[in-house]
Each structure stands twice: as C-alpha cells, then as structure tokens.
Amino acid sequence: MVDNQYRIMALNYIWVGLILIAVLVGCIQWLVMGDAGIMSAILDSTFASAKTGFEISIGLTGVLSLWMGIMKIGEQAGVVNQLSRGVSPFFTRIFPDLPKGHPAFGSMLMNISATMLGIDNAATPLGLQALREMQETNPDKNRASNPMIMFLVLVTSGLTLVPVSIMTYRAQLGAANPADVFLPILLATYFAAITGVVAVAIIQRINLLDKVILGTLGGLTLFVGGVIAAAMYFPQETVSKWSAVLAAVLLLGVICWFIIAGLVKKVNVYDAFIDGAKGGFGTAIGIVPYLIAMLVAIGMFRASGAMDYMVNGVAWCFAACGLNTDFVPALPTALMRPLSGSGARGLMVDAMVQYGADSFVGRLVSILQGSTDTTFYILAVYFGSVNIKDTRYALACGLLADFAGIVAAILLAYLFFH
C-alpha cells in the first residue's frame, strides 16, 4: 500500500512532468523557432524508446538469472548469517539505544548483508521487519527513534558489495568490461555510508572514538585512502586495468565462496541455483513496463531539446567557474537517484545508449546509479510501514549521504576513467 502510494505521488509527477515539458518545449520550437519537424521527432522517439526498453529488459534475463541463482546459493548456505555475525560488534555500538540481544539486530544485520550482496528481494522485507521490531520498544509511536534513523540512513546510503544490476545493464548495452565500474562504485558507496553514519552519530552523540567504531571506520578509511592514493599515483590506463582485474577476482571469489559454503552446508547448489535463476527471469520480465515508461518519457524530453537546454545551462554555469564540464550530461541521473530508482535507471540507460556504455558519461552514470539509494522512496516505505509521522532529521542525513555519494562518484569517475 505504502509502496503504491509513493509511486503514485513521486513517479506520477516525474513521468507526467517529463512528457508535458517535452511537448511544451516542442511547441515552442515549432511555433516560435520554426522547427516543423520537432513534433514528428518527439513522436518517433516514443516508438524508438519503447523498443529499446523492451530489448534491454529481455536481454537482462540471462545475466539476472545467473546472478540471482548464485545469490540464492549464498543465501541457503548461510553466507548472509556469517556476514551478520561479522559486523555485529560494530552494529551494537552504533545502535546504543537498543537493548543487547534485541530481535531487531538480527533483521537489521540480515538486511544490510542482503543489500551488500544485491539480494534486494530479501533486503526489503527484512528491513521492514527490523523497523517493526524497533517500533515495539519505541516510546513515541509517531516519532522516529534514534536507532530507526541510523538504520534508515545506512539503508539509503546503498552500500553494495556486488552491483549486479548495474553490471548487467552495462553488459547488455555492449560494455567491453561491464565490471570496470565495480571498484569506483564500492568506493562511492563507502563515502556515502560513512558520511551518513558520522552525521547521525554526531547528532545522537554516539562515541565515535569507541575502539570498535574507530577501528572499523578507521580501517575502512585507510583501505579506501590507500586505493585512491594508488589510483592517483599510477597512470589512468593502469588504474582501469587493475580495477577490472580486482573486480574479476573479487566477483569470482564471491561465486566460489558461495558454492563452497553451499557444499560445506550440504546444500544442493544446483537446485538452489535453478530456484534463484527462476526469480531472475521473473525480475527481468517485471521491469519491462517500468523501464519502457521512463525511457519513453525521457526520450520525448530529449527529442524536444529540453534535455539539451538543461544540460547546456548547467554546463555554462560550471564553465563560467573554470571547471571541467564532461560530467554534466550525467547529472540528470544523479538528481533523479534520491527520488526514484526506476527513473534513475531509465536515465542511466538513456545516457549509455546516447554516449556509449564505455564512454566517460556511460561509466559515470553507472557509478552514480550505484553510489546511493532512493532516499525519498525508502523513507516513505519504511516509516510508512510503522506509521511514523515525525521522521526528525532522517531525510536531512539521508540526503547528505546522497550528496557525498554523488560528489564521490563524479571525482572517482575522473580519477579512474578520464
């Protein structure tokens, strides 16, 4: 119910707005500027975009089935539980208001672990369960508690270890190495997550100097700093090459880890894979109408010239400040990301089709898509599920994390691919 209400409120306005603006700009181009072919171009874009959306969605079936099959093996092998136990000491300290052993810890850890592994279908119900469990001990049922806010800011930062869907889209759109954005995405999501956690911790007066918190955040920061320092020291070609190699090693490592864990747990890994792969087929088919809807609206927006006006206006502002403007065509994806996952996905695909999957813009939109999550959607769905009306500073901290992820994504794209 909450999911549908949010989509009606946000996606309805976004979709209708793109179409109406496209038609309005087209009319101006025709009546004022004398471009008699603009209306035909806008109409033609609807057919071309619908065809593109269908072809991409159908082409996703194989790769999505593969990865969802692998993820199902890991799920049945208890890998998510292993990750939960590994991060438990850190989580108990950033949620000090929850009693030790509170049932919400298990659901939260499972949610975060599933998100990191890209098991979205499992992550959402686990997250909603965690919020319901926290609501039971919440003294004010209409007001978000401190643990709720910390948890949702972590969720909105979108920390992902295996960005399966993005690599799948890149493969479908002809990227030579779909995984070459793996490391930049991981780094960008880290910056988003660390910004969100620190912001909430400061407001909630959580002791960031606690040895477990300091050790965890400090260790991760040193690792990320080392990666960035190495990326700055070596030539761009070397950085791109080793990023792709590292991505291949880590992803193959994840596959082997899941399969070996399944064998140890005596899981029938073949049956588990088939079970998960069936879900991949359903997922690919299920996104067809959403992707077509957004691509048609975006195609009209672009064909009318409205997209060019917007991008050129932003580019002029940055150029006036003496800054490089190669990243500007990717900004629509960045601006859409906190509002709508499907909308941002449509813009990402549109940019890769327009500029090429292996172009700077094509890689940047991929990193932007993976750097954060849909903050407005997540807050609406999660808080709505427990009837929270006063979300306090959750939105502000979530958007701050989004901003950090977007800035990091742009800078990392320049560092790795420009």
Image: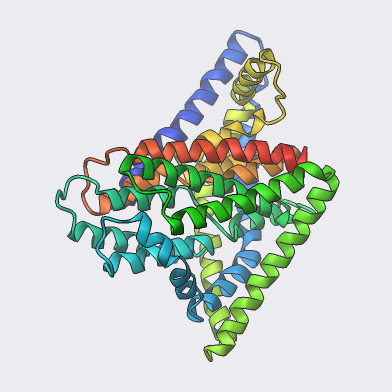
Where is residue 297 shown, x and y percent of the image?
54, 36
Q: Quadrant of residue 247?
A: bottom right
Q: Horizontally, is 88 left or right of 262 in the view? A: left
Compare residues 104 and 263 and report the one nearer the observer: 104
Q: Horizontally, is 250 left or right of 215 in the view? A: right
Q: Quadrant of residue 121?
A: bottom left
Where is residue 149 shown, x and y percent of the image?
32, 47
Q: Horizontally, is 201 left or right of 161 in the view? A: left
- Residue sitting farthest toward the top: 32
Residue 66 visible in the snapshot: yes
In the displayed structure, would residue 205 be above or below residue 275?
above
- Residue sitting farthest toward the bottom: 266
In the displayed structure, would residue 208 be above or below residue 133?
above
Q: How is the image coloured?
A: rainbow
Compare residues 330 and 189 and report the one nearer the observer: 189
Compare residues 190 and 15 and report the one nearer the observer: 190
Callout count: 0
**Which image quarter is the C terminus in?**
top right
Residue at 23% across / 54% down in the picture?
386
Where is residue 10 shown, x and y percent of the image?
39, 38
Residue 47 visible in the snapshot: no
Residue at 50% across / 30% down in the picture?
19
Q: Horizontally, is 205 left or right of 334 in the view? A: left
Where is residue 406 shown, x and y percent of the image?
56, 38
In the displayed structure, would residue 307 be above or below residue 214?
above
Residue at 31% across / 38% down in the picture?
393
